[in-house]
Image (cartoon, rainbow, N blue to C red):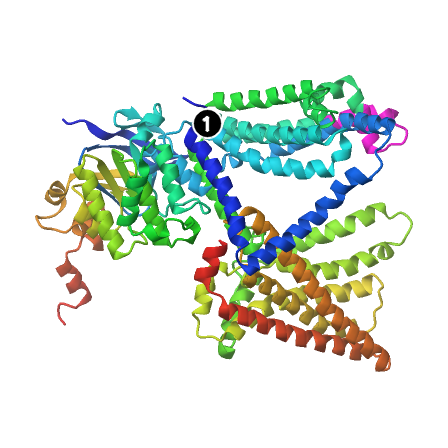
């Protein structure tokens, strides 16, 4: 078995009596793009924040590049980057200063040419001197993504990365994620946009109420929950919906239920 | 591994430089330059006389200096102890661990140890403490013998209190937070009780019975000395004649205490990142709430109360209805604040009143209270554009004229405040024996005065739509000062002119109170109409994209 970049074993997160994530285990290998999907409150963000070393697990272990995020957090964090949903920036720092600071954190030598390429790619070059607070929601997202790519991490985690991005930004991000995987990094994307996850990912991790429903390749997911060629949406609903729920209905069943078949 | 890594030092420097740059950017626009100049003048007005007095005033005699120093040395440790107790009680859980949201997103997942992040937080805190201690040192310069040791002493004291809060928050994370918070409060209360008991015990011998002299007596006793021992180096630094002479030892000791506390904080090695992230989120939400509600949000509300929809009136009705519902649901909060205002104003005269009759003692207080309601309640019951700062796009997109939108925004708070003020005034008129004839005639004037105040509040807001959550330090404070001063100045001129017309009418129209009231109300109505018109013009010209981005 190839070395895992991320290895999560029996990760559990408890808030008092509430079990947010229950004994979750999965691994990410180099080049894999994994879609982390699940309904609201499934524990997706909690899991990502735990991997990023922000919240400690109640039990279980999380290792990034072989380093435990609890016991050896600095080495683990050197290898990862986490772009949260609606990333917050330093309002009074400029775009360039955010990149300068990020380069300093991850000890990126000769960061300026890399930063220029990223800025150009995400159409932020004209905004180089603008303060973060002068940027639109989408531009702030793009800047956070540029900062994330600056040090070429081994593990990239995106929480709802497309929010606020324009079509060109979405396309650029998709290409950049594929390039990231191609150079040997692992990417974990949490999103409710299932079509996008389907486009990008090689593997799938479905969570529901903190419990793992599925972990494996897309082909395995289809084999387990639907038929070949079924959409990820269908797989998702079948994996997470209760028996008899509308989510399990086929399109034909839905049409006959609302009478549109007769029409 | 370095204690404070280079990237974190770089961040402190970048942010410091950014705040200076922001000042420069503000000064580039006429509005910003005006704010900086007027704000600078106000700050200078506070500082310059004090600084000049250092040179102009005849220096006190050596005996007077020695006496002040001796008194300060006895009392200051108790002041510092008070600060410590306050911080022990107020460090509710993890508040001291709060970071900026951007710091959470950038620094928490970055390769820094928890100790490095703590040191960053402590180092970053030094800059505002430098300013605060400088400001306070100018005001309390007479406590010590020389200004520099006073400044350094105050800086070390404030830093000590901050580090202590941090240590307590970390200890709360290390041990069971809820139980620890309880024990901490119990310890603070016990300490307070012991100090009060000690002061009363030692104060038996003080003939004058003055509280400060009783505290001094306790400070001279051995138990008092022991109690304040940890704070003595800070007090001695503040009162020292020089940092290299009698200040050297206390400065060194104060520094050592702070360093020891930092070591304790690091050694606790608590897993505080999660608590820090949550606390930061809460702090941001709280700041947002303060911005919208003036700091009195979040309390209990009459959420079950319903109100029928008003007639449309070109859109005015539904908008006013929305504000009214919000006002009524915030009513409990307004009444609570009103009750505090009444208590603060009424209790001290009641306690000190030994000879006069009760209505006599409260008579002037009642009049002040009525004026205060007009000025203070609009800050609490924010039912206007200030509360709608995030919904200005929505309001601008409505098929309602800007004038009607603006009128709906200001008429509701004015009506609600008059609704509280008028019955209260009528009751006070009877119970306190003001015996003002025809007080009811003044209700329309009070309404238009409240409308005027609400309009001026909104003019100031639409001119400087600052957001406290992301406000940029100095110029935010300056614009607030300038806004308030201009508001009060405009109010004084407008109400003053109405009163002048009222006095004229009273004299010329046969000393008729109703006619004078009508004259005042008419002038105020005219002024209100003009100010509402200005509000509507400013609202129509307001560009949320530009204003909120530039002033955020």
Coordinates of residue B7 in the picture (x, y in percent): 41, 32
> Which corner quadrant of the image does residue A251 belong to?
bottom left
**Nearer to the camera, B116 or B35:** B35
Give the structural element (helix, strand or loop) at label 1.
loop
Query: Image height check: is A210 above or below A251?
Result: above
Q: Residue at x 77, y 38 (%)?
A: B54
Residue B319 in the image: x percent, y percent? Answer: 51, 70
**Residue B509 shown left or right of residue B31 in the figure:** right
Q: Chain of mark 1?
A: B
- Inspect the magenta stretch and tell me whether residue B208 lies in it: yes
Dot 1: within a 10 Å radius of its alpha carbon, few (fewer than 14), some, or many (20 or more) residues?
some
Does residue A18 lie above or below B512 as drawn? above
Q: Position of residue B462 (x, y in %)?
A: 55, 63
Q: Residue furthest left?
A: A228
Quarter of the figure with the N terminus of chain B: top left
In this orientation, which residue lies closer to the viewer: B387 or B469? B469
**Residue B350 is at least partly visible in this image:** yes
Q: Which residue is mark 1?
A: B4
B106 and B127: which one is in front?
B127
Name the side, left or right, on which B465 lies relative to A102: right
Seen at 50% across and 51% down, the residue is: B288
Residue B471 seen anywhere in this rendered image of the structure:
no
Main SS of the magenta segment?
Answer: helix
The total of numbered circles placed on residues is 1
Looking at the rendering, which quadrant does residue B232 occupy? top right
Q: What are the residue bounds of the magenta stretch?
A: B195-217
Q: Position of residue A61 (x, y in %)?
A: 30, 27
Magenta includes B469? Answer: no
Identify the residue shown where x is 50% and y is 59%. B389
């Amino acid at each position: 078995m190839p070395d895992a970049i991320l290895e999560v074993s029996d990760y559990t997160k408890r808030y008092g009596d509430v079990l947010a994530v229950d004994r979750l285990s999965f691994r990410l290998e180099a080049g894999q793009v994994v879609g982390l999907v699940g309904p609201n409150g499934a524990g997706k963000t909690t899991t990502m924040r735990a991997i990023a070393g922000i919240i400690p697990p109640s039990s279980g272990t999380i290792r990034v590049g072989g380093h435990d995020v609890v016991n050896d957090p600095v080495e683990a964090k050197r290898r990862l980057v986490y772009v949260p949903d609606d990333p917050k920036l330093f309002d009074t720092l400029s775009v360039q200063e955010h990149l300068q600071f990020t380069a300093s954190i991850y000890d990126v030598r000769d960061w300026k040419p890399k930063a220029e390429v990223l800025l150009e790619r995400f159409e932020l070059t004209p905004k180089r001197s603008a303060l973060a607070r002068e940027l639109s929601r989408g531009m702030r997202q793009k800047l956070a993504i540029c900062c994330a790519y600056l040090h070429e991490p081994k593990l990239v985690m995106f929480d709802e990365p497309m929010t606020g991005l324009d079509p060109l930004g979405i396309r650029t991000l998709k290409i950049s994620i594929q390039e990231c995987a191609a150079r040997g990094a692992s990417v974990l994307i949490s999103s409710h946009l299932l079509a996008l996850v389907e486009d990008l990912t090689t593997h799938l991790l479905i969570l529901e109420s903190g419990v793992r429903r599925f972990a494996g390749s897309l082909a395995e997911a289809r084999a387990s929950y639907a038929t070949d060629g079924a959409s990820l949406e269908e797989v998702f609903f079948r994996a997470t919906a209760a028996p008899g729920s509308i989510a399990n209905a086929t399109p034909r069943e839905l049409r006959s239920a609302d009478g549109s078949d007769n029409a | 591994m370095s204690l404070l890594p280079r990237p974190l030092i770089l961040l402190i420097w970048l942010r410091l430089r950014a705040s200076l740059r922001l000042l420069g950017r503000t000064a580039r626009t006429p509005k910003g330059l005006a704010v900086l100049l007027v704000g600078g003048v106000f700050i200078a007005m506070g500082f310059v006389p004090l600084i000049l007095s250092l040179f102009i005033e005849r220096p006190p005699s050596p005996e007077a200096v020695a006496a002040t120093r001796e008194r300060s040395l006895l009392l200051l440790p108790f002041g510092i102890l008070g600060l410590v107790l306050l911080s022990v009680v107020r460090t509710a859980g993890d508040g001291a661990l709060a970071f900026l949201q951007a710091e959470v997103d950038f620094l928490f997942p970055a390769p820094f140890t928890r100790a490095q992040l703590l040191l960053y937080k402590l180092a970053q805190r030094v800059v505002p403490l430098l300013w605060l201690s400088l400001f306070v040192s100018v005001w309390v310069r007479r406590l010590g013998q020389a200004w520099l040791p006073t400044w350094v002493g105050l800086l070390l004291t404030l830093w000590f209190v901050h580090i202590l809060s941090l240590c307590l928050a970390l200890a709360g994370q290390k041990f069971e937070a809820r139980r620890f918070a309880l024990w901490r409060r119990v310890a603070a209360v016990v300490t307070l009780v012991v100090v009060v008991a000690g002061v009363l015990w030692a104060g038996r011998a003080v003939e004058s019975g003055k509280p400060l002299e009783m505290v001094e007596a306790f400070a001279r006793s051995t138990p008092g000395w022991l109690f304040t021992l940890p704070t003595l180096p800070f007090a001695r630094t503040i009162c020292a004649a020089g940092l290299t002479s009698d200040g050297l030892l206390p400065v060194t000791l104060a520094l050592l205490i702070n360093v020891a506390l930092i070591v304790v904080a690091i050694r606790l090695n608590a897993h505080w990142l999660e608590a820090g992230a949550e606390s930061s989120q809460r702090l941001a939400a709280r700041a947002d709430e303060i911005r919208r509600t003036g700091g009195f949000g979040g309390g209990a509300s009459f959420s079950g109360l319903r109100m029928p929809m008003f007639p449309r009136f070109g859109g005015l009705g539904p908008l006013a209805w929305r504000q009214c519902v919000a006002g009524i649901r915030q009513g409990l909060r307004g009444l609570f604040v009103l009750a505090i205002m009444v208590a603060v104003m009424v209790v001290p005269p009641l306690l000190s009143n030994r000879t006069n009759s009760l209505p006599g003692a409260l008579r002037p207080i009642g009049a002040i209270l009525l004026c205060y309601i007009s000025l203070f309640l609009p800050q609490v019951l924010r039912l206007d554009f200030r509360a709608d700062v995030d919904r200005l796009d929505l309001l601008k997109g409505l098929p309602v004229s800007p004038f009607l939108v603006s009128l709906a925004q200001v008429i509701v708070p004015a009506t609600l405040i008059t609704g509280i003020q008028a019955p209260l005034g009528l009751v006070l008129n009877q119970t306190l024996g003001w015996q003002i004839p025809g007080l009811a005639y003044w209700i329309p004037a009070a309404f238009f005065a409240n409308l005027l105040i609400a309009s001026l509040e909104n003019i100031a807001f639409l001119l400087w739509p600052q957001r406290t959550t992301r406000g940029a330090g100095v110029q935010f404070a300056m614009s607030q000062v300038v806004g308030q001063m201009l508001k009060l100045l405009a109010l004084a001129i407008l109400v003053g002119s109405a009163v002048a017309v009222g006095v004229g009418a009273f004299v010329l129209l046969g000393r008729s109170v109703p006619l004078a009231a009508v004259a005042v109300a008419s002038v105020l109505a005219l002024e209100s109409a003009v100010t509402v018109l200005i509000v509507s013009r400013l609202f129509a010209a307001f560009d949320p994209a530009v204003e909120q981005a530039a002033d955020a």
